[in-house]
Each structure stands twice: as C-alpha cells, then as structure tokens.
Amino acid sequence: MEAGFFNKDQMKHLAVGVVVAYAITSIAFLGFAMLITYTNMSERSLPMVVMVTTVLSVLVAGFDAARGATSRGWLWGMVAGFVYVLIMAIIMVILLPSFTVDMRTVLVSVLGIAGGGLGGVIGINLKK
C-alpha cells in the first residue's frame, strides 16, 4: 500500500463507491419510472424520490470510500458525496441545456455531501 492520503487503493475504493452509488440510483430511478408509467402514481413525488435516492446512494458511496481509508472516514465520505454530486451536475447540464441551479439543487448537493460524510463515519468505524 502506498503512503499518503491519495493512494491507489483508496482511489479504487472511492471509485467503486461512486459506481455502486450510481447503480443504486439507476435502479431506483428505473423503478420509479416504471411505477409512474404503469400505475396511476403522480410525478409530484419525483423531487422527494430524487432526494431520498441521492442521500441513500451517497451514504453507500461514503461507506465504501471510507472502508479503504486508514483515517478520516468522514472526509473520504464527503469526497465521495462531492464526486457523486459533481457527476450528477455534469449529466444534468449535458442532458438538460435549460438546467439551472436553484435552492432544490443546492439542497440535494448539500444532502449528498453530508450523506457521504455520514456514510464515511459509519464505514470507517465498522472497519475496526
């Protein structure tokens, strides 16, 4: 294992955590899309589904990222949450040219980073 904060093993855990988080997000969004399509469910609950899915996904990303850390699990979790939110923002800008940053976007971003931090705290402490 390499010395230092940013070593290959830690970057691998961070990447795996974010990929797993996006797999969870994809499955949840696909399931919600099917519910909207094949039932009488309204799209009004979409913002809440996005928030809950984001928090749960980054919680897992933070958990995975911190499992490879020797210390500062909260920081690695927050980094995982930030990477997740950043990728989501890039995807939104590409797919929705009219995308703007509003209070909901800021709230989801803050919840994403905080959720990652919480996952990091859990991940580093369960490792011991």
Image (cartoon, rainbow, N blue to C red):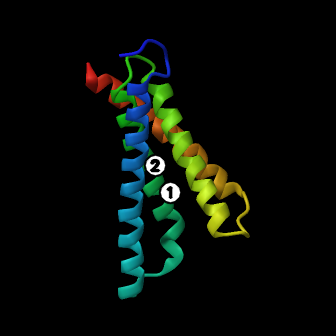
Measuring 36% from the left and 35% from the top, which residue is drawn there?
63
Measuring 48% from the left and 38% from the top, which residue is drawn there?
80
Along the viewing direction, whichever of 120 and 67 lies nearer the viewer: 67
Q: Are marks 1 and 2 in contact (CB under 8 Å)?
A: yes
Bin the neighbour count of mark 1 within 10 Å (Cα to Cα): few under 14, some 14-19, many 20 and up.
some
Extreme residue in the top direction: 3
Residue 59 is at least partly visible in this image: no
For residue 34, above or below residue 126: below
Q: Secondary structure at mark 1?
A: helix
Q: Amino acid at mark 2?
A: Val
Which corner quadrant holds the C terminus? top left
What is the spatial separation of the Cα atoms under label 1 and label 2, in whole angstroms?
6 Å
Residue 70, quarter of picture: top left
Residue annotated with mark 1:
51
Residue 109 is at least partly visible in this image: yes
Q: Secondary structure at mark 2?
A: helix
Q: Amino acid at mark 1?
A: Met
Q: How many marks?
A: 2
Measuring 42% from the left and 36% from the top, which residue is drawn there?
62
Q: Is residue 127 left or right of residue 83?
A: left
How far across and down, in percent of the image, does residue 54 sit?
Answer: 47, 53
How far across and down, in percent of the image, does residue 39 sit?
Answer: 36, 86
Bin the neighbour count of mark 2 within 10 Å (Cα to Cα): few under 14, some 14-19, many 20 and up.
many
How far across and down, in percent of the image, does residue 27 sit?
Answer: 35, 64
Which corner quadrant holds the N terminus? top left
Disc marking residue 19:
none
Along the viewing direction, whichever of 124 and 12 lies nearer the viewer: 12
Disc marking residue 55:
2
